[in-house]
Image (cartoon, rainbow, N blue to C red):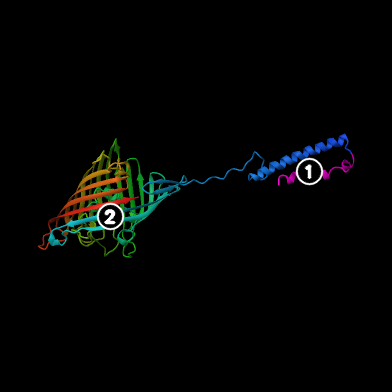
Amino acid sequence: MRLACPAALLATTMLCLPATAHAQAMTAEEASALRAELAALRTQVERLEARLDAADAGSPGASPSASAPAPAASAAPVTTWKGAPEIGNADGWSFKPRGRVQIDVAGIDTPGATGNRGGIGSEFRRVYLGVDGKIPGGFSYRVEADLANGSVELTDVYLTYGPGPLSVTAGQVKPFWSLDEMTSDLFTSVMERAAFTQAFGFERRLGLSAQYKGKAFLAQAGVFGDNANDLLDDANNSFGVDGRAVWMPKFGDTQLHLGGSAHWRDFNDSAATTRYRARPFAHTTDVRLVDTGAIAATGERGLGLEAALLSGPFHAAGETFWQTVRRPGLPDPTFFGGYAELGMVLTGESRTYKDGAFDRLKPSSPITAGGIGAFEVNVRYDHLDLNDAGIVGGRQRAALVGLVWAPIDYVRSTANYGRLWIDDAHIATAAGDRDYSADTFGLRTQIDF
């Protein structure tokens, strides 16, 4: 194409020359004019070449020095590993699969006459699968479900907006009760949480909540309905308000935690009942040695206090919680639960703490580096009293010892033994005795990602 254009231009110019230039010898003036025409033709050819070069570069008609700006490149995705691949980019998008599997073997041994002596049960305690991530503009999300033992139950399902210290969340989350409850089940000291968290019905609920997180202060509050799996019942019209505040300063290597929580709930049903009961620190059994039975009530309110201290390999924690039931025309009973705990990481690491809760135990010498992982021992005294104002649900005291082994960050085994003392037990012996002791034991193996 480039050769054809100059050739055509030359041919056109030659045809335009005076006829006398072809018929006879040129004079000096004619030769000079011809040279001028050739010079002009050369200039036109150079201009055509420049235009063709510009066209080849994607900018037709532009001068050689003016090139089109390159199109903006989109942010390339980057994959990191946090127990599972997390994909994100500089624009603020991220996506990560998440999950956990917990396999339990546990048992409860009570006096033979109660019919619960001996025997070992096993189960998938939890099988969580889900995803979480971030969306540009300060949004984050999580969608997760528990698939354990052939059923499907939604766990965390929420959308959060919060580019700064203040955030707002819509969806199903844990209302803000208790240090033990807010600590993930992946990182608890023994296999099951404190008895009062079971007895008082602490569970995830659907609602709207807000959180402020400063360097040493955390405030959380929300309005909640019920658990998403229970909202399909048309008779379930209950709603509640929950709040929690934590002061969490750090003094050198020592982390302090002081907090409190409040709970108020209206059952919003004239025929509503409630029930408080707890398993004996083994989820493989349906036995509840303490149980209030159904109580006619219009609502409930609760108040909790919590404290913890972490320093080097040592930690201490304790909580109390009072739950009052509102009964129409009858005295309102107040039930009580709490625990005190001491623990030590035998291999020298520190139990970690994050955002008002205990976090992951990370071995400094994992077995993948030729080490033995991290070992932690915990002892706990637990107390639950379901007797008050004419309600006799029983009193349960327990001394628990737990051993935790974390060979790597995302694998963990927990073994625990507990001695229980029961007064006014829900299940009596054949002789009618309701005051006796029992033993509980368990082993859990888990992986999370």
Total marks in image: 2
311 in relation to 280, above or below:
above
Rounded to the nearest angstrom, the CA distance separating label 1 from label 2 is 89 Å
Which residue ends up furthest to the top in the rendered image? 28
**In the image, which is nearer the foreground, mark 1 or mark 2?**
1
Give the residue at x 80% y 45%.
Answer: 12
The image quadrant of residue 71 is top right
Residue 27 image point, x, y percent: 88, 36
* Most foreground residue, 228 or 374: 374
Give the residue at x 18% y 51%.
Answer: 418
Q: Which residue is mark 2?
A: 103
Q: Which residue is mark 1?
A: 10
User: What secondary structure prevails in the magenta region?
Assistant: helix
Q: Is residue 11 magenta?
A: yes
Whichever of callouts 1 and 2 sits on the residue coming sooner in the sequence is 1
| Magenta extent | 1-24
Question: How crowded is the residue under tag 1: few (<14 C-alpha within 10 Å), some, or many (20+)?
Answer: some
The image quadrant of residue 325 is bottom left
- What SS does tag 1 mark? helix
Q: Is residue 145 magenta?
A: no
Give the residue at x 29% y 51%.
Answer: 446
* Most foreground residue, 421 or 328: 421
Question: How crowded is the residue under tag 2: few (<14 C-alpha within 10 Å), some, or many (20+)?
Answer: some
Name the kind of residue labelled 2 in the image: Ile
The image quadrant of residue 290 is bottom left
48 in relation to 277, above or below:
above
**Residue 1 visible at all:** yes
* Most foreground residue, 32 or 142: 32
Residue 113 image point, x, y percent: 12, 62
Residue 369 image point, x, y percent: 32, 41
94 in relation to 24, above or below:
below
